[in-house]
């Protein structure tokens, strides 16, 4: 009986309804024109988004009706975040299958996934950050980072200024009007304190930025959280103290390469200890802010209450035919 049930489950998975979600005007419409015939030849369906936020709404509606569907989201980090938000809203994290195909201006979540989750058809349980009623699959960040994303978005609209270059230019622009915020960061579910479930740590300081990371990269290749794993049951919290512009400028190149954390000890490297707090944990709260960036999407908000949902969605890499 168990064998029969297993065979039936495998057959059901192989018959999943595959739906590709694409922004038809991305890249001036060139991307959609390039991939639509391939997808059509495969006999798979396409949904063209109609507005900002439409991806998440469509995914949620589809999965309420078809909880076993296979969602293939074409886009950048914002699109991946929307798709995962739709999966979570539908309560289909354990039934639906999710794939990302990079076609956005920032593909940092998929940068990590492509390097570490390579076998198509293999299902990879993936953690998700839940914060203030929204979801993030890559990185939630506040403070200076939000200003950088906003500036980079303006710069990205200038011809020839896309991708990681726009983020670097955004840093320079944001530094000119650098702002900090004072808060108390409260962390719980800290790695290494599993035997002390009531243990709570509070960090009171003035900060330039705070990143809550499930993935390793943001900003077009900045390895903000080199020790993060999308399936380890923890997110990585990195808080940079309010440092001077010259100090920040002198450290940013190493920060981009992920050189601020030691992979052997799992701790902040000596050079960065004066400037950076780092913890792996399951919950974090803080306030004193004005906006929050969820996978590249900026929303207004004066506080964060984030928790890690372990193995919340199921990811599989794309077929070769989907990569154009």
Image (tube, rainbow, N blue to C red):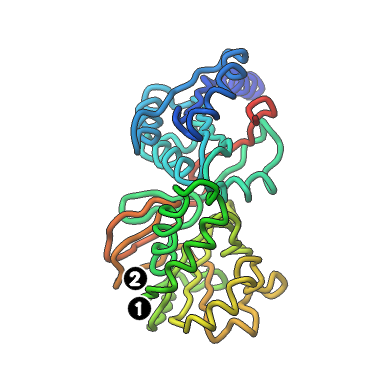
Identify the mark nearer the N-term, 1 or 2. 1
Q: Element under label 2? A: strand
Q: Is residue 17 above or below residue 232?
A: above
**Image quadrant for the N terminus?**
top right
Q: Position of residue 54 (x, y in %)?
A: 35, 33
Residue identifier under label 2: 286
Q: Position of residue 80 (x, y in %)?
A: 48, 42
Q: Element under label 1? A: strand
Distance in Å between CA atoms under marks 1 and 2: 6 Å
Question: Is the residue under label 2 in contact with that under label 1 (CB below 8 Å)?
Answer: yes
Residue lying at the far front in this picture: please name it.
159
Q: Is residue 52 above or below residue 205?
A: above
- Give the residue at x 48% y 32%: 28
**Quarter of the figure with residue 66:** top left
**Residue closest to the eye, 309 or 168:** 168
Q: Position of residue 203 (x, y in %)?
A: 41, 81
**Residue closest to the eye, 40 or 116:** 40
Q: Position of residue 267 (x, y in %)?
A: 62, 76
**Quarter of the figure with residue 262:** bottom right
Figure disc tally? 2
Q: Is residue 103 above or below residue 261?
A: above
Residue identifier under label 1: 184
- Give the residue at x 56% y 56%: 165
Q: Residues within 10 Å of mark 2 (few under 14, many from 20)?
A: many
């Amino acid at each position: 009986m168990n064998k029969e049930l297993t065979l039936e489950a495998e057959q059901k998975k192989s018959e999943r309804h595959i739906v590709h979600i694409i922004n038809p005007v991305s890249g001036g419409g060139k991307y959609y024109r390039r991939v639509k015939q391939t997808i059509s030849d495969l006999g798979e369906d396409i949904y063209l988004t109609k507005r900002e936020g439409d991806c998440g709404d469509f995914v949620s509606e589809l999965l309420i009706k078809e909880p076993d569907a296979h969602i293939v989201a074409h886009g950048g980090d914002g699109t991946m975040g929307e798709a995962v938000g739709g999966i979570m809203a539908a309560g289909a994290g354990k039934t639906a299958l999710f794939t990302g195909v990079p076609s956005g201006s920032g593909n940092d979540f998929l940068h990590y996934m492509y390097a570490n989750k390579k076998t198509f058809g293999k299902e990879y349980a993936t953690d998700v950050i839940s914060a203030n009623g929204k979801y993030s699959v890559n990185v939630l960040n506040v403070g200076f980072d939000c200003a950088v994303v906003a500036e980079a978005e303006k710069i990205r609209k200038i011809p020839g200024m896309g991708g990681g270059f726009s983020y670097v230019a955004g840093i320079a622009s944001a530094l000119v009007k650098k702002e900090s915020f004072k808060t108390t960061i409260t962390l719980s579910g800290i790695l290494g304190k599993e035997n002390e479930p009531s243990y709570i740590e509070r960090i009171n300081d003035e900060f330039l930025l705070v990143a809550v990371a499930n993935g390793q990269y943001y900003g077009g290749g900045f390895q903000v959280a080199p020790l993060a794993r999308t399936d380890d049951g923890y997110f990585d919290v990195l808080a940079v103290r309010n440092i001077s512009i010259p100090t920040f400028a002198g450290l940013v190149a190493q920060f981009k390469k992920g050189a601020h954390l030691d992979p052997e000890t799992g701790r902040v490297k000596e050079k960065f200890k004066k400037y950076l707090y780092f913890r792996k944990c399951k919950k974090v709260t803080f306030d004193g802010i004005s906006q929050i960036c969820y996978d590249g999407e900026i929303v207004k908000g004066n506080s964060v209450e984030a928790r890690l949902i372990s193995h919340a969605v199921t990811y599989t890499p794309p077929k070769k035919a989907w990569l154009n």
